[in-house]
Image: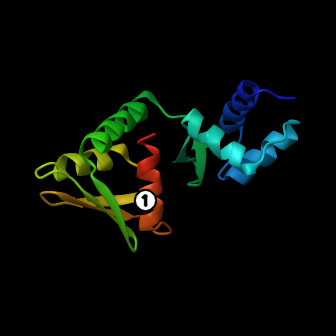
Amino acid sequence: MTTKFERQGTILRLVQQKPLSTQAEVAAALQETGIDAVQATVSRDIQQLGLVKVRNAEGRLVYAMQGADDLRRLDELTFALRRWAGGFTPAGNLCVIVTPRGFAAALADAIDAAELQEVAGTIAGDNTVFVAARDGSSGVELIHVLRSHLQ
């Protein structure tokens, strides 16, 4: 039986050695090393390890470890969301976030600075932020991504 520590260590080694783009590819690569893991476990491991998707030399999105700057930007996003996000509402490919008056711009700046792969950009009013999803994502998915930074 493989421990969580061993499995996660193997995932880190695999993403450094191979271009893995999906959770299914990570699970298959684990299987090749003799470690059985279901998609839900791989998903949880990827989140706990803080892996992000980056473009490799061929332009393909692959899993990679975050750099220190990425961690700082994500910490700032978490702080901003906890402090100013009042409610999330999906609207097509948008996520609408309500903030206290005067804080929408600060929250939008933090979202933009985080450079989340699902976010195309933001527009801020006085107490409302519109977050636009990149092609292929929806407002509901954006809410899940942003809320994951609150945990």
Closest to the observer: 17 or 50?
Answer: 50
Whether residue 19 is visible? no
Closest to the observer: 32 or 103?
Answer: 103
In the picture shown, does residue 16 fall above or below 114? above
Q: Where is residue 60 in the image (x, y as percent from the top left)?
A: 59, 54
Whether residue 65 is visible? yes
Closest to the observer: 3 or 22?
Answer: 3
Q: Quadrant of the N terminus?
A: top right
Q: Residue at x 34, y 59 (%)?
A: 88
Q: Position of residue 56 (x, y in %)?
A: 57, 47
Closest to the observer: 79 or 123?
Answer: 79
In the picture shown, does residue 117 fall above or below 130? above
Q: Where is residue 89 in the image (x, y as percent from the top left)?
A: 34, 65
Q: In this view, does 19 lie to the left or right of 80?
A: right
Label 1, residues with CA under 10 Å away: few <14, some 14-19, many ≥20: many
Q: In this view, does 31 lie to the left or right of 144?
A: right
Q: Mark 1 points at which residue?
A: 142
What is the three-letter code of the residue carrying label 1?
Leu
In the figure, residue 97 lies in which quadrant?
bottom left
Q: Position of residue 137 (x, y in %)?
A: 48, 66
In the figure, residue 32 lies in which quadrant?
top right
Question: Residue reaching furthest bottom?
Answer: 92
Q: Residue at x 80, y 40 (%)?
A: 30
Q: In this view, does 43 lie to the left or right of 92?
A: right
In the picture shown, does residue 20 fall above or below 95? above
In what element is the residue under mark 1? helix
Q: Which residue is drawn at 43% across and 27% down?
A: 68
